[in-house]
Amino acid sequence: MIQTYSVREPDAQSAIPLVFDSPHSGIQFPPDFSCCASIEQLKTGWDAFVDKLWEGAVLHGAVLQSAHYSRMFIDLNRASDDIDPVLLASPSSECKPTRYSERGMGLIRRFALPGVALYAQPLEMDEIKMRVRDYYLPYHNALRNRLNNLHERFGEVWHVDCHSMKSKGNKMNIDSGESRPDVILGDNDGLACDPEFVQTVEDALTRLGYTVVRNIPYKGGYLVTHYAKPDVARYSMQIEINRRLYMDERLYKPNAQFALLRKDLDSVACTMGTYIREHLQLDKQ
């Protein structure tokens, strides 16, 4: 059986309804994967070390789920039918492309970088269905089950979707050429998450000296919009961390500030945990 993701769990007694997931932290590819892009070009879609940056959250009662396989193989932060018909050898009624596919960044990417095609030959729909079955669904099933179980136990659940971003957008991004802030919080313009929770996270980051922006240009991708149901106390938000804060963007190696950022994010995770415990009055039970 293919091991497509890892889950780190808190001590049972400290567990709270808080789930972090890092869908783009993987860099693996199947041994038979073939494409036109170089290893360096494939790495540009890698949220390098994001799972490591947030792993301290487990000590504060959260679950951390992280992907093993690259988004350049299949993107877990897209709908399973967000398929670009241009990639297919023959038309299929199962394709429902979104704005992501229009930019070459759907479930199966058309481009690794602007103008850099991933595939020399069109793909068969059966190949895409295999990727969904063996790599996409196991991750989503595990995340959904975890969120369901915690919601059933506590009555509410908070989901934090963790990402990194290039320090400057490229031509495939809607903010092409623009420098980015330290952190972008995405709550789908207030529709996906508990506003007090988002404010708590923003305040914690600001106190640590980071520049924080909400929803511009990232409002939250498929994982946030799909799993958020605030009307039934299911909250979801996205956190994008600027890569220049912690890594050499050219060499894909941690820089001298990595340990400091990891410590700061551990503090932010602690603040999240405190908010949830106080909100649910868990310490009084």
Image (cartoon, rainbow, N blue to C red):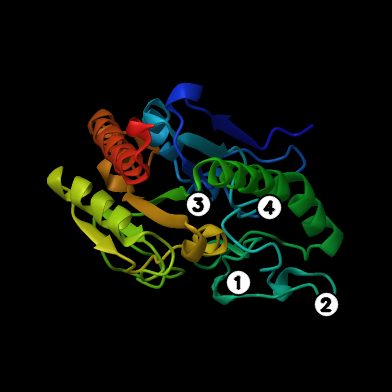
Q: Which residue is mark 1?
A: 101
Residue 48 in percent (x, y) is at: 44, 40
Q: Which residue is mark 3?
A: 45
Q: Quadrant of residue 165?
A: bottom left
Q: Which residue is mark 4?
A: 35
Taking 154 as reference, is 118 left or right? right
The answer to whether residue 34 is seen in the rendering is: no
Q: Residue at x 81, y 51 (%)?
A: 130
Q: Quadrant of the C terminus?
A: top left
The answer to whether residue 153 is seen in the rendering is: yes
Q: Which residue is mark 2?
A: 91
Of label 1 and label 3, which has the lower sequence position? 3
Marks 4/1: CA–CA distance: 18 Å
Q: Residue at x 15, y 42 (%)?
A: 208
Q: Residue at x 62, y 36 (%)?
A: 5
Marks 4/3: CA–CA distance: 14 Å
Residue 175 in percent (x, y) is at: 35, 71
Residue furthest to the front in view is 285
Marks 4/2: CA–CA distance: 21 Å
At label 1, the amino acid type is: Ser
Q: Are marks 1 and 3 in contact (CB under 8 Å)?
A: no
At label 3, the amino acid type is: Gly
Q: Which mark is residue 78?
A: none
Residue 186 in percent (x, y) is at: 37, 61
Of label 1 and label 2, which has the lower sequence position? 2
Q: Is residue 69 above or below residue 194?
A: above
At label 2, the amino acid type is: Pro
Secondary structure, mark 4, is: loop
Q: Mark 2 packing: few (<14 Cα in 10 Å), some, or many (20+)?
A: few
